[in-house]
Image (cartoon, helix red, strand yellow):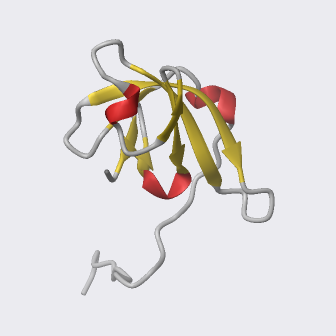
Amino acid sequence: MKGFQSTNWNKEPERMAIFGREILGNAVVDRTGAVMGSLVDLSFDLNTGLISELFVEVDASLDASALPFEHTGTTVKIPGTAVARIAENIHLNV
């Protein structure tokens, strides 16, 4: 069929390279879209290049101790596995 392009639905999603400093300060939102806070630091797995942890300064209206993550003061440590996607905001799957 002319103009038809087949799509491989089983293909792994494409990954895009980012620099950590490009996303520092971005809002971090939960799966409902509610803002949790802003990204203040992150760490990477040096073997895979994937994000291993996010450090998020929790919004003043939230209690960091009420969240299901390790915290120090108002900063929570979120595992990289909780990241659904990174766009204008950092979207979590929790």
Q: In the image, 57: left or right of 62?
A: right
Q: Residue at x 60, y 46 (%)?
A: 53
Location of the N terminus by quadrant is bottom left
- Closer to us: 34 or 16: 34
In this view, the residue farthest toward the left is 32
Residue 55 visible in image: yes
Q: Residue at x 46, y 68 (%)?
A: 13
- Closer to us: 35 or 74: 74
Residue 81 in the image: state x and y as whole percent. Answer: 49, 58
51 vs 36: above or below:
below
In this view, the residue farthest toward the right is 46
Residue 28 visible in image: no
Count of number-bearing discs: 0
Residue 37 in the image: state x and y as whole percent. Answer: 40, 23
**Rendered image quadrant of residue 58:** top left
- Closer to us: 20 or 15: 20
Residue 5 in the image: state x and y as whole percent. Answer: 33, 78
Residue 11 in the image: state x and y as whole percent. Answer: 45, 80
**Rendered image quadrant of residue 69:** top left
Q: In the image, 42: left or right of 92?
A: right
